[in-house]
Image (cartoon, rainbow, N blue to C red):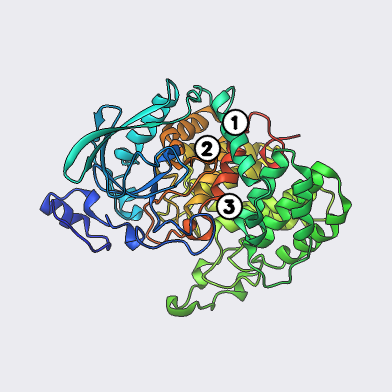
Amino acid sequence: MMNIKSYRVLPITFLACTGMSLHAIEENNRNRWATPSKKGPDKEVPGYLINLGPTGARATLESKSFTVKYIFADSPAAGKLHLNDVITGVNGKPFEIEHQFGHHLTRMKKFHHVGYEGPLMDFGNAIEDSEGKDGKLTLSITRSGQKMDVAIQLEAIGRFSNTYPYQCKKSERLAKGAMKYLSGHSFIYKEKCHAKCMSGLALIAAEKMDEAKKLAYAWNEIPTWGIWVWPASYQCIFLSEYYLATKDEKVLPTIQGIVKVLEKGQVIDMADYQDRKHGKMGNVGRKFRTGGFGHNTKVGGYGTMTITTALAVTAFELAKDCGVEVKQKTIDLALAYLKKSTTKDGYIGYHTHRGAYAPSGRQGLSIIAHKLGEDTEVNRAYIQTASLGLVRSKKYLNDAHADNILSVCWGLLGANCSGDEEALRGMMDYNKAWINMARCHDGSFVSIPGRDMHDKGYYMSSRLHLTSSMALVLSMENPKLRMLGKK
């Protein structure tokens, strides 16, 4: 096997001619194994490593092994594993399937059948087996050239049920652990966008209303036009859900103000954008679409995007439920843009229906946006189409562009809100081992490297964003939020 240190994507024809499998591409994790986060609870970890579930160890991932690179002092792995131990199997079974690395644009087009099978899935399934018995997890390792077995004692908390997160004691327990981790976490207030909102929503779901109120009041200020669509939408979503849970009228003027800011950020007349340029990308006017939203409320950057459009619609629908005035034309145009950007098999592109970025986050969020709208035949048909897309994209859940946690968050929440059993079970069951691998020993969840070369989710919020998202996913049996199904 060739050892390619460069992380550029090689042509598929070259791979075929050499007989080289896909996993040799980008095996240094785009230089992120040794690039630590500069903030948050993982800033002491030496890089963006694979979390080995609730063991408390982090590692690099080779094709058929893990190499331990960090161990938390108070974790089950402390005193059991050593740095640079090479893990070659678990619970008596060697890792036999190679993990398939490689930039996901290539993988989705040419290797669409490939997911996270290999050491990641095997390890996550072993955690499930061990926790379903006595909690003993046995790792086959090589240490300083010597082969040996190391036993790590996990809590015997049981297995996920066949219907998880519904009727599942383990889901309930993990959700409570995640919410406990978030409770009183001062770092929430330092966040500006995704993690701040989702953490606040998790506090509401956990009925920790004093903490939710404190966060709502700290975020109770109307942003100025020019703010990015992301934080404005998230602020509106959180404050709206807070109002719906408490009827605290102090946040209503801010919700109304955010709506007005967002409404100004929608593309209405295409003629205003046809000559728009974006740095080295040159003319990007062709990437603007009527009804869409871009990164910024001034509709700057490189065009409209389906995910910010779905996020803005979700904010509008929730604000409308609060009694705030929202222009229905704004919602209708945005939903029309989303529908035009969705193929008949449920794929939703980045700008339009074309493209190859992993779509599960866009699919899930679009489902939620349409569920919040009127119960019409058109919306029901769209939800069915987008749900079909979720079924097809279950293997790409963690491979999202820019922020893989966005994909995990909205992909799983959307599947749970879809009403489509195939989409729900496909997403939850296929990614069960992945969820076990993302669990930390302290009840939190941490980002795991995906395949997109531009993914920066770990560096934006390694823990809070995913922890809050999983707290919501695993408590879906009794939703406390309007956007997740509370009437």
Which numbered disc covers residue 419? 1
Alpha carbons under labels 1 and 3: distance apart: 20 Å
Quadrant of res 364: top right
Confirm whether residue 333 shows in the render. Answer: no
Q: Nearer the viewer, residue 358 or 3?
A: 3
Name the spot of residue 268 as percent of width and height, x first. Answer: 66, 66
Alpha carbons under labels 2 and 3: distance apart: 14 Å
Dot 2 or dot 3: first in sequence order is 3
Q: Nearer the viewer, residue 345 or 50?
A: 50
Which numbered disc covers residue 387? 2
Name the element at disc 3: helix
Name the element at disc 1: loop
Viewer-nearest of discs 2 and 3 = 2
Circle 1: residue type: Gly
Residue receiving disc 3: 338
Please identify the residue farthest to the front as the structure is shown. 79
Name the spot of residue 407 as percent of width and height, x first. Answer: 50, 48
